[in-house]
Amino acid sequence: MGDISVSSQGNGKAIGSHWLILSIVGFNFISYVCSGLPLAVLPGFVLKDLGLTSVLAGVVISSQYLATLLARPLAGTVADRLGAKFAVVCGLSGLMLSGTLTVAAIVLHTQSWLTLTLLLLGRLVLGASTAMISTPCCTWAIGLCGSSRSAQVMSWNGIAAYGGTAVGAPSGVLLRNSLGLFSVGLCTVLLGLVFLLVALGKRPAPIVAGARLAFHRVLFTVMPNGLVLVCSSVGFGGLTAFVALYFDSQGWDHAAYCLSGFGVGFIFARLTSPGLLQRFRGYKVVAGCLLVQTLGMLLIWLAPSPALAIAGGALTGIGVSWVYPGLGVETLASTPAANRNSALSALSLFFDTAVGVAGPVMGLVASGFGFASIFLCAAVMSAGGFLVVLCLC
């Protein structure tokens, strides 16, 4: 009986930890739903309604990731010093402001320069808000559940992120078609408000004592892993910024489902291989993922039909699935606990750099060689990341 009682208590504790992790990474899910809502609708609005270029359409989408990049050091410092919950609350408040700016931009769309300015401001605020939510959600959950749950937390936090994008992109299309484009911004405001109220009622994680390293020192330590993340993330940046225009150039419909396919593939890989990082070293997992991602991008590049392009998106999602957790586990293993927010923020900064640069750079590539060439370039970058990982193993 004693063994059964201990076992029941252990199972109950594990289930409690699972729910606690899910309840916190849920804030990251909502932030990425808000990020995904405009992905399939804003490029067409910039090109057709405002009459601007594909490069500017890429800038509008990628400006969010530039803002996230610039806000990463602040997010890491705030979370390390004031607590991860405080950072998440700031981020959710930012979602409300971003949605308000987007609504204003759509309402004033008769003046292209004013609309573009408000759209960019909204995207910048959204990017900064994402930085304040994504990594602090990880460290908030780790702080409450213990470092032994690090791989699980990063895995579920990633599922929340890409799952949110997968839900957000088609939801944005549905909102635009049924209520008008302004409803995308209004939905962002409402989601930010509801989940801000939820976050305020949750228990904060204890702030870890210890020496705080300067962010540039943490960044330098993380750099090798960050370069691998850059090679992996360029494909995601190109996919989110240009998949809608790529499908349009081919005369295909349902571009949002390519993003959904990415999210489904990503989540499927995470859910069906939960112990992957425990069985193999992080770098070995990352190397295998980069090969799969390369194949996915090549399939999108060569796809003769939208169905195969969507399948390529799903394969890319499978490839991306364990790249960040694998690199994150390797990063945390070499970082003092008092600096883990800054370390993961520094690692994520490389992701933001890649995605932010991907928009305008891939826009130039598309202008010269067509939208399909974007995915060939992304495949080459993924293959390059595989070679870098071989040097780190």
Image (cartoon, rainbow, N blue to C red):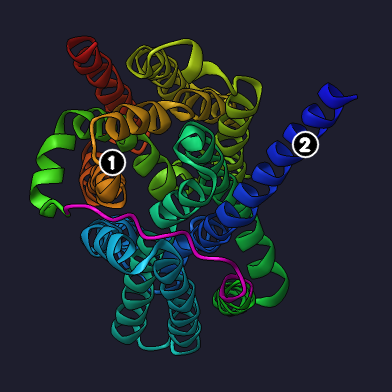
Name the one closer to the observer, 205 or 313: 205
Q: Is residue 63 above or below residue 385?
A: below
> In the image, which is nearer the foreground, mark 2 or mark 1?
2
Q: In the image, is 192 to the left or to the right of 239?
A: right
Nearer-the-camera pick, 295 or 148:
148
Residue at the limit of the structure toward the front, as seen here: 2
Where is residue 35 shown, x and y percent of the image? Answer: 48, 60
Distance from the alpha carbon under mark 2 to that under mark 1: 58 Å
Up/down of 318 relative to 260, above or below: above
Q: Which residue is mark 1?
A: 366
The answer to whether any part of residue 128 appears in the image is: yes
Q: Which mark is residue 9?
A: 2
Which of the image's four quarters has the C terminus? top left
User: Marks 1 and 2: in contact by CB < 8 Å?
Assistant: no
* Residue at horizontal 46 percent and vertical 88 percent from the top: 104
Residue kind at label 1, given as amino acid type: Ala
Q: Residue at x 24, y 27 (%)?
A: 228
Q: Is residue 277 found inside the magenta-colored segment of the image?
A: no
Q: Main secondary structure of the magenta part?
A: loop
Residue type at tag 2: Gln
In the orientation shown, which residue stands out farthest toward the right?
A: 1
Q: Position of residue 204 (x, y in %)?
A: 50, 65
Q: Residue 75 in the image: state x and y as whole percent.
A: 30, 62
Q: Which element carries disc 2, helix, strand or loop?
A: helix
**Disc 1, SS:** helix
Query: Can you say whether 305 is above or below 356 in the image?
Result: above
Residue 206 is inside the magenta segment: yes
Which residue sits at x=65%, y=21%?
272
Residue at 36% x, 11% y is: 284
The residue segment tinted magenta is 198-211
Q: Residues within 10 Å of mark 2 (few under 14, many from 20)?
A: few
Q: Nearer the viewer, residue 286 or 379?
A: 286
